[in-house]
Image: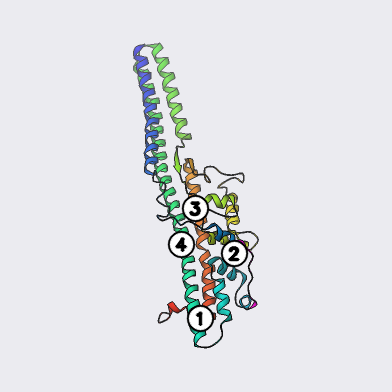
Amino acid sequence: MASARSKRGWVCLACLDVLGTGCSSVRHIERRGAEVDYCVPAQPVRYDVSRSAALEAPFEVSEDLQRRFTRQDLLLAHAAGVLGALESLARLGEGADSAERRDMLLGEVELRLLLFSTMLSSVAAELDCEAGRTAQVASLLDGLASRRQRLLTISSIVAGALATTVTAISRDDNADDIIDFTGGVASAGLGLAALLSSPSLRFDHPRNLLADVWRQPEHSEAFPPALWYVLRHKDFSNEQRHSISYNVRARWIAYGYVEEKGGEPFFDAGGRYTLDALRTRTNMLEELQAAVRLIHQNLQALLAKLVATWGRPAASRGGGP
């Protein structure tokens, strides 16, 4: 009888060892992903709240500029802070003084549009980095899940075979019953665990750019005011019915990434993630990144009209196509 209990204990310990190995591997992955802020800008920019309010305030545009540029061009110029300079350019006359003034204004416009373009690239780079960090952890967890599933499947087969072998060589009927029962339970439990195996881990993201896109606040603390203005203004979307950020949020729901009532922990500072949830977060980050990058198309259209209207900015003269 003691021998039977010993063999039964060995089988149970083997099961616990399999599960314990999985837990330690999850902790190892969590430690590898512990550097939660390496995608955050090394020199965080503090955004001026008054800038957000100024962008939302109504503004007037001269008829001259309305003839030269589309409404989307003018809204982008307003977001980038060059609308005043464009008004000044439109009022300039002829003469040497006007030419010098034009070059100075064009230089100011070029610098501000360069700053706006750099800001777009910076946010897109952060989203790309965060998507890569999430995908890397997902890849590690996927490898762990595959190894754990294989180990559980093999352990299930071994447990069943061991019980059968021990029963065949045992001469104790009572022990045979105990071994058969224990082996059957262990084999079935390990097989079921292999089928339902879905490891999860703690994944933190204190700075979460997805959160404001989901909650749609009037002013954002995570996004630069100029970019948030563009993302929130419906005139920048293709159909101009809803804003870019609204459409991104709607696609998240339509694609089944998240339910309309909300999807924790995607929009918090972190939480418990399964492999599927990590992959979903990666897709959401990549989609938001694409939306930010596409604003460069609006910027390119504005620059093309500026060049066609007033020529190349002063800093760009002296060569090139």
Number of the front mark, 1 or 2: 1
Residue 292, x across and y down, in percent:
51, 60
Helix, strand or loop at mark 4? helix
* Front one among 255 and 48: 48
Helix, strand or loop at mark 1? helix
Location of the C terminus (image quadrant):
bottom left
The amino acid type found where label 1 is placed reads Arg
The disc, 1 or 2, on the residue closer to the chain's N-terminal end is 1
Structural distance between the alpha carbons of marks 3 and 1: 41 Å
Number of the front mark, 1 or 4: 1
Q: Which residue is mark 2?
A: 236
Residue range highlighted in magenta: 54-63
Structural distance between the alpha carbons of marks 1 and 2: 29 Å
Residue 122, x across and y down, in percent:
45, 60
Q: Quadrant of residue 180?
A: top left
* Front one among 141 and 63: 63
Q: Are marks 3 and 4 in contact (CB under 8 Å)?
A: no
Q: Quadrant of residue 246?
A: bottom right
The amino acid type found where label 3 is placed reads Leu
Q: Which residue is mark 4?
A: 121
Helix, strand or loop at mark 2? helix
Q: Is residue 285 visible?
A: yes
Q: Which residue is mark 3?
A: 285
Residue 266, x across and y down, in percent:
52, 45
Neighbour tally class for label 3: few under 14, some 14-19, many 20 plus, Cα within 10 Å: many
Residue 102, disc: 1
The amino acid type found where label 2 is placed reads Phe
The disc, 3 or 1, on the residue closer to the chain's N-terminal end is 1
The disc, 2 or 3, on the residue closer to the chain's N-terminal end is 2
Residue 212, disc: none
> In the visual, does 261 lie left or right of 109?
right
What is the image's colouring? rainbow
